Image (spheres, rainbow, N blue to C red):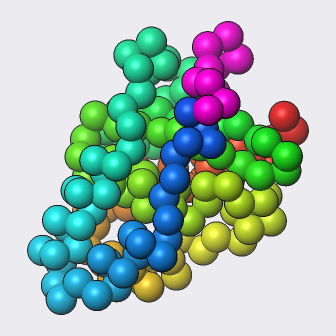
């Protein structure tokens, strides 16, 4: 997952704030898929882009059709992630996932039910099969990173 020789700074991990109280209502209150789609694209803009030097093959998430990179760091029993993609929708989906897991403990991350989470947000059945597979691959990568000893 993360490259042990090249990694973002600790401040980069802890500086990424995705407040579910602020973010999730834009999805749950959206009247239709077009509004959710727009909210997704806007959310992706909140993720800081990874430096080109961090777009390492070792950090790429396998299973995504688009390029996506994921870095993980455990700090005091809490798990923090940095991720990026070159595709706007994927980047928004990454931000949604990170909203649910950023700064959480291993048990909370392991218990995340992606299907239930996307049902709550009105995204189930709206994503193409390839995007759904990519999001599932990313969610598994997030869970696997939280389950690895640091």
Q: Position of residue 129 (x, y in %)?
A: 31, 61
Predominant SS along the magenta part? loop
Q: Position of residue 69 (x, y in %)?
A: 47, 33
Q: Quadrant of residue 73?
A: top right
Residue 66 shown left or right of residue 136 in the figure: left
Residue 126 in view here? yes
Residue 3 within the segment the image draws in magenta? yes
Q: Residue at x 41, y 72 (%)?
A: 22
Q: Which residues are magenta?
A: 1-11
Toward the viewer: 132 or 83? 83
Q: Position of residue 72 (x, y in %)?
A: 65, 37
Residue 124 in view here? no
- Relative to 58, is 92 above or below? below
Q: Quadrant of residue 26?
A: bottom left
Residue 26 shown left or right of residue 79 in the figure: left
Q: Position of residue 131 (x, y in %)?
A: 32, 56
- The N terminus, quarter of image: top right
Tell which residue pokes out farthest to the left in this image.
34
- The C terminus, quarter of image: top right
- Relative to 118, is 15 above or below? above
Residue 128 shown left or right of residue 77 in the figure: left
């Amino acid at each position: 997952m993360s490259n042990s020789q090249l990694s973002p700074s600790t401040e980069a991990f802890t500086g990424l704030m995705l407040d579910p109280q602020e973010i999730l209502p834009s999805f749950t209150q959206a009247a239709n898929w077009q509004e959710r789609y727009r909210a997704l694209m806007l959310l992706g803009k909140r993720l800081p882009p990874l430096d080109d030097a961090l777009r390492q093959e070792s950090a790429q998430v396998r299973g995504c059709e688009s390029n996506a990179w994921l870095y993980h760091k455990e700090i005091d029993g809490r798990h923090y992630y940095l991720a990026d993609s070159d595709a706007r929708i994927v980047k928004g989906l990454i931000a949604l996932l990170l909203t649910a897991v950023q700064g959480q403990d291993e048990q909370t991350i392991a218990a995340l039910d992606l299907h239930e989470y996307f049902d709550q947000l009105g995204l189930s059945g709206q994503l193409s099969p390839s995007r759904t597979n990519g999001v599932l691959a990313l969610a598994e990568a997030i869970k696997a990173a939280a389950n690895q000893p640091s």
